Structures are given as C-alpha cells and as structure tokens.
Amino acid sequence: MSAELHVNTPLWHSLPISRLAGKPVYLKMEALQPVGSFKIRGIGLLCQKALAAGAKQFVSSSGGNAGVAAAYAGRELGIKTTVYVFAGVPETAKLRMQEFGAEVVMAGPSWAEAHAMASELAEKQGAFYVHPFDHPDLWAGHSTLVDEVVASGYRPNLVIASVGGGGLLTGILDGLDRHSLRTTKVIAVETYGTDSLHQSLQAGQQITLPRINSVAKTLGAARVCDAVFERAVRHKVESLVVTDEQALKACRQFALDHRVLVEPAAGAALSVAYEQLGSVPQASDVLVVVCGGVGIALRDDIFAYAPRLPD
Ligand SMILES: *Cc1c(COP(=O)(O)O)cnc(C)c1O
C-alpha cells in the first residue's frame, strides 16, 4: 500500500495550560494535518484500503471535516469523490472540499439526509461509502495518533478528547489498549446539544438525540457508533459536557496562547484542559487531542456559516 495520507503531527508542551493546571500538559496538534483535522488518519486509511479493493468512486456524508478529508484522499488517490453536506455545514469547509476537487451536494437539513443520500449513491453506482465515524479501518487509522505519542516517549495517564460520532475516541481507546495504557484515564468531551455519548452512558444504553443544537457542528452526531459505546463502558471513560460559550472561550484563549485557530469541537476538549484539570489530581501527565477543524474563521462576514471567535 502507498504511503500514509496523514502526517506525524507535533506534540507540543503547552506552557500556558501546564501552568494553569499545575502539571505537564501536552497537545497532539491534529489541527496541523494537511486537511486541518485528525480525520485524514482514519479516512486516509479507509480510502486506501477501499482503492486496493477496487473502489472507483468515493462518496461521503459530512458536517465538514470528514468531507474535506475524503476530498483530499480522493485527490491524492486519483478517485472521483462526492460529498453530501447539509444545512449549517460551514462555507469554509465546503470551499476546502471543492478546492480538493470533490463534488459538493446539499442534501437537506441534517446529517441523516446526507447519510441516506450517500448510502443510496453507494448502492446504486457502486461508489465506496466513506463513513465519517463508523468503520474498523477508520478507527485503525485514528489510532495511529496514539502510536505517535508513545513513539515520542510520552505515556500520558490522562487523555482528553472530544466526541462526535465516536470514531476518534474509538481509535484512541484501541491505541491505548495496544500500548498497554489501559489504566490511562480518558475524558470524553461533548457540548450540550451534541451530548449523545454522555446521555447514552447515563442511560446505560445508546440513545438518539431528537435534534442537534450546538455551535460545535462537527460534534453533532445524534447517535454514537456501537463501537465507541462498548469501549467507553469497558474503559470507564469519564464523559463531560461543556457549554458552547466554554468551547468558544477556549478556542479564543488557545488562539492567543498558541496562535492556531480551531473549531468549537476542539474548543470543547480544550475548555476542560483550561478550566477543569485542577479537579483531576491523579492526572500527572496530560494529553489533549487538539482535533482541529476547518469550520472556523476570524470574521463571520468572510465565511457566512463559520462560528466566529467571540470578542
Ligand atoms: C469529526 C470531528 C470530531 C469528532 O470526531 P468523531 O470521530 O465523530 O467522534 C471532533 N473534532 C473535529 C474537528 C472533527 O472534525
């Protein structure tokens, strides 16, 4: 198989966050992937395997970053790619997909319609469906993030990451398992209005949110994948929910501290690092997965749907 489509991202020691937390906090800088998020790890591997198995066309359904990653993979692998998007997907994300040569089609009000249309195209035209979060090859790709951290010599005993449909968290938990880091505590973060994992864990069974209501669009999966629910229960993942305001505030502070713009999806995990690490005394070596995201802009008059950083 050809070389990986993702890059080995930097592991930054965050002095500002470490100072606040009173302990070393490291950042896995997935915002610095060529597509702006970790998504290319899983989607890159998924698409490479699909191509090796004979795929002639890719089709994806996406709130933004999965579509950008699919478009990038399609371009790199020379495969025609179609992405079904839905209302509220940031203009900046759609532009990135088109820039990478993908066809972008508006599917309807929510991810459910995009998913249905993408699945139908896959069935009718024999295109390969690049699911945004639910496939074993995708999780295997995401898990390389943990391989890189461990290879650098850092063995965190606390990992903080945000959760949408749960592909990222599934990969992280599999990666921790592979490196015998089963006692490493994991905090999974969602925003109110996207908290499908949190509500599922509270209910002791998977629930489906009636609607998505948060500025963190890329965390907006009404129902998480089975794999993440099972693993989260087994690993005793701690699930936290933050407000949109907390996520946006963390995005702004992070831009000031580290000069990188990230989506509220990443701000959710960062807000726990900024605000709540003091209350996790047993965590001595912290890793925050800065998942990134292209759906962010300095000014909302440039990209009409991108969340704007608060003043
Ligand atoms: C997709 C995405 C998430 C959530 O990942 P899941 O695998 O759906 O849980 C978080 N942050 C960003 C920036 C994303 O693109």
Image (spheres, rainbow, N blue to C red):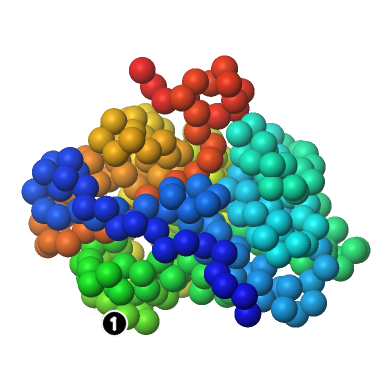
Which residue is more in the foreground, 215 or 18?
18
Figure quadrant of residue 284: bottom left
**Left or right: 47 in relation to 187:** right
The x, y position of residue 213, in whole percent, is 53, 35
Which residue sits at x=57%, y=17%?
301
Residue 245 appears in the figure: yes
Give the amino acid at mark 1: Ser
Relative image position of residue 247 (x, y in whole percent): 37, 36
Q: Residues within 10 Å of mark 1 (few under 14, many from 20)?
A: few
Q: Position of residue 246 (x, y in %)?
A: 33, 33
The answer to whether mark 1 is within 8 Å of ligand 1 is no
Name the residue rendered at 42%, 63% in the picture: 8
Q: Quadrant of the N terminus?
A: bottom right
Residue 254 locus on image (x, y percent): 31, 37
Residue nearest the observer in this picture, 29 or 181: 29
Q: Is residue 254 above or below residue 311?
A: below
Q: Nearer the viewer, residue 32 or 43?
A: 32
Q: Secondary structure at mark 1?
A: loop
Q: Quadrant of residue 47?
A: bottom right
Q: Residue at x 79, y 77 (%)?
A: 54
185 is higher (above) or lower (below) than 277: below
The reply to whether residue 161 is in sight is no
Q: Relative to 294, is 277 above or below?
A: below
Q: Residue at horizontal 66%, vertical 76%?
A: 49
Q: Please name the residue that numbered disc 1 is placed on.
A: 180
